[in-house]
Image: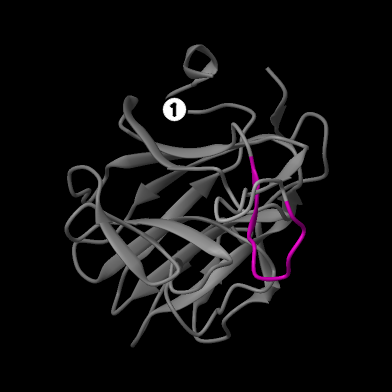
Amino acid sequence: MNLLDQRRTPKICISSELSHGGLEIYNNNLSLKGYGGYRSALSTHGLLSGNFYYEAQIESKSGNIRLGFGQKNTDIYAPAGYDKYSYSYGDANGYIFHNSVRKTYSDTYKYKDIIGVLLSINTEPTVLKDYTRSTLVLDSSLKFVSRFSFIKFFKNGEDLGIAFSNINPGIYHAVVSLYCGGEVSLNFGPFFAYPIDNHI
């Protein structure tokens, strides 16, 4: 499995430059705590193709958290999933979010749970077909997607299933959003609490 991990790349952690200044980032940039409204942080490294997995341990009993992936254009003044550049899974009601659309996904998660976050993305973008015409057309109004790409989540080692598929192409970073005391510790590998080699 071609997971992006720290055996083959420089150390991955939260990027201070790609994070909102209102977040407390500590523990060698692997732990974060939020104060006030939703604010977001992205990892130092992003992925264009292949697989990217990380784990987040929930360190707070209050506040709210969203975990997922986002491009550099992700709005760090808003929760992940607010815009078209990010995808996330929230703790409060188990919803998933993308482009401000909320959908039911799975259970909630809470203090000391470990959430695994996996992105698997294809290298070849494909234009969506305009079914009002007889042929494939290139049009600025059409979205491009990466076929066979997906994001899924794990809770304490349990595979929760695919949350998003046909991911918009781009370079994706891990993204964490915290609200009113939400706090997490991140693990970018190579050694995980719940390895996922058998799930890809």
Q: Quadrant of residue 114?
A: top left
Name the side, left or right, on which 148 lies relative to 127.
left
**Disc 1 secondary structure class:** loop
x and y, in percent, of residue 127 in the image: 70, 49
Q: Which residue is mark 1?
A: 193
- Residue at 58 percent across and 26 percent down: it is 191
Quadrant assignment for the N terminus:
top right
Q: Is residue 118 visible?
A: no
- Residue at 55 percent across and 43 percent down: it is 166
x and y, in percent, of residue 99 in the image: 45, 69
Q: Amino acid at mark 1?
A: Ala
Q: Is residue 184 visible?
A: yes
- Residue at 44 percent across and 27 percent down: it is 193
x and y, in percent, of residue 130 in the image: 60, 54
- Residue at 69 percent across and 52 percent down: it is 169
Instruction: Please tell me whether the stretch drawn in magenta is mainly helix, strand or loop.
Output: loop
Nearer-the-camera pick, 108 or 22: 108
For the magenta stretch, what is the residue range? 137-146
Quadrant assignment for the C terminus:
top right
**Taking 178 as reference, is 149 above or below it?**
above
**Taking 140 as reference, is 95 above or below it?**
above
Q: Quadrant of residue 184?
A: bottom left
